[in-house]
Amino acid sequence: MKFLYLFSFLFISITSYSQESFEEIATSKDGTKYYINIVDFDITNNIWKIWLKTEYPHKKINAKNGKSLLKYQGHQIQYLVFYCDKKTADILEYYIYDSDGAIESEGNSLRFNSNVVPETITEWVYNYTCK
């Protein structure tokens, strides 16, 4: 019965996500915000495919007129695959955006079977998705 409730919850949760939809899952002490977008979930093998968005906090800068302004510092997005039963992850793609929203850097990480390191945002995301 517990499995039926879990399966129903997961089905409703997964089908409610769209490709453009990110859900805020954490904020660090420095104000960095973390969001996930669940792309796919393989219930048979307990594998989650997600986009992780890291949004950096606004930075206080001093303008020429002596006033303080807050400047957006940009964000990054990573494509991750979590293998929940093994507690490992693949990091496949990343995109780093500057404060104007333009891509500053992008690439394929191609890090396979990386251990989920304790006390990191990756572990937090792993715990959020896999447990």
Image (cartoon, grey):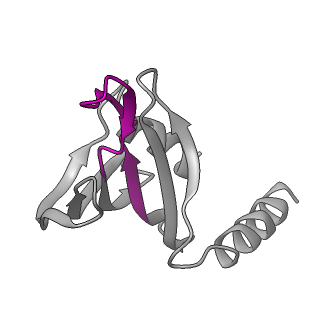
In the figure, is residue 63 to the left or right of 17? left
Q: Does the stretch in magenta take in 56?
A: yes
Which of 11/121 is in front?
121
Image vertical order of residue 27 relative to residue 30, above or below: below
In the figure, is residue 14 to the left or right of 122? right
Image vertical order of residue 84 relative to residue 17, above or below: above
Q: Residue at x 39, y 47 (%)?
A: 55
Q: Residue at x 51, y 75 (%)?
A: 20
For the C terminus, give its image quadrant. top right
Q: Which residues are magenta?
A: 50-74
Q: Quadrant of residue 18?
A: bottom right
- Image spot of residue 63 (x, y percent): 28, 31
Residue at the extreme front: 65
- Image spot of residue 50 (x, y percent): 43, 64
Q: Quadrant of residue 90?
A: bottom left
Q: Quadrant of residue 105?
A: bottom left
Q: Does the stretch in magenta take in 13?
A: no
In the figure, is residue 42 to the left or right of 109? right
For the N terminus, give its image quadrant. bottom right
Image vertical order of residue 69 relative to residue 83, above or below: above
Which of 123/94 is in front?
94
Q: Residue at x 78, y 64 (%)?
A: 9
- Image spot of residue 6 (x, y percent): 76, 59
Numbered marks: total:
0
Residue at the extreme right: 1
